[in-house]
């Protein structure tokens, strides 16, 4: 009897996780905009104010630009994401920020956020179990289609947990 209840609880949790993923996809489609998170530092708060000021100033020169999410991906072992086409505008924003940050001096930027090493993506779910990853991919296999939208904001953010510390609208 306890085993049956535990099994039922696990099935309900799986349904809930699927529902959360569906909601994430729906919200992405409905808003059709994304906050482009261009900066992740190695937990270095020393330059945080300067970085926010740099991105704020740069964001005033950037226009909104189109994005198209064309692929579902995974960062193993527990992240599912949508990947946009890396167009000229998206690359320019990331490269501009990287270039300015290297001028600050002793700022350590993770390799995965450097030009030609960065993989643009929109995280749908993270910290999934192996079974949840499989369920998410199965669900996306049946539900995902190309999503067109536009970048309307740029953010300075921290990860794990994700937290925007400054967000700026593009013109």
Image (cartoon, rainbow, N blue to C red):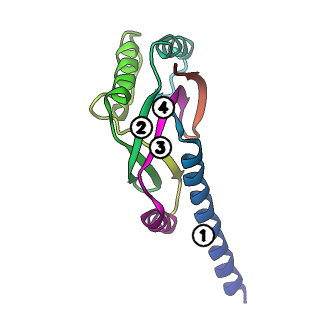
- Closer to viewer: mark 2 or mark 1: 2
| Residue 39 appears in the rendering | no
Q: Quick check: 117 left or right of 170?
A: left
- Is residue 47 positioned above or below 164 on the image? above
* Distance from the alpha carbon under mark 4 to that under mark 1: 32 Å
For marks 4 and 2, the one nearer the N-term is: 2
Does the segment drawn in magenta span residue 89?
no
Element at label 4 = strand
Residue contact at pointers 4 and 2, CB within 8 angstroms: yes
Q: Quick check: 90 left or right of 169?
A: left
Residue 14 is labelled as 1
Residue 124 percent across, percent down from the top left: 52, 50
Instruction: Give the residue at mark 3.
Output: 122
Quarter of the image for residue 94 reads top left
- Closer to viewer: mark 4 or mark 1: 4
Q: Identify the image quadrant of the N terminus.
A: bottom right
Element at label 3 = strand
Quarter of the image for residue 168 reads top right
Residue in view at x 61 percent, y 25 percent: 165
Residue 151 is labelled as 4
Element at label 2 = strand
Residue in view at x 31 percent, y 28 percent: 88
* Distance from the alpha carbon under mark 4 to that under mark 2: 7 Å
In this orientation, which residue lies closer to the viewer: 52 or 64? 64
Q: Which residues are magenta?
A: 130-159
Residue 121 percent across, percent down from the top left: 42, 42
Circle 3: is it few (<14), some (14-19), or many (20+) Cα within 10 Å?
some
Instruction: Give the residue at mark 2.
Output: 67
């Amino acid at each position: 009897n306890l085993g049956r209840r535990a099994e039922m609880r696990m099935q309900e949790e799986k349904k809930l996780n699927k529902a959360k993923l569906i909601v994430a996809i729906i919200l992405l489609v409905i808003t059709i905009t994304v906050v482009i998170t261009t900066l992740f530092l190695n937990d270095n708060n020393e330059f945080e104010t300067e970085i926010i000021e740099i991105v704020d100033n740069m964001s005033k020169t950037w226009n909104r630009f189109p994005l198209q999410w064309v692929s579902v991906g995974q960062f193993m072992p527990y992240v599912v994401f949508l990947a946009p086409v890396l167009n000229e505008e998206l690359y320019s924003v990331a490269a501009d920020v990287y270039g300015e940050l290297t001028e600050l001096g002793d700022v350590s930027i993770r390799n995965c956020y450097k030009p030609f090493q960065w993989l643009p993506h929109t995280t749908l779910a993270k910290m999934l179990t192996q079974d949840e990853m499989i369920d998410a991919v199965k669900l996306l296999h049946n539900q995902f289609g190309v999503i067109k939208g536009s970048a309307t904001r740029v953010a300075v953010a921290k990860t794990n947990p994700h937290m925007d510390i400054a967000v700026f609208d593009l013109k």
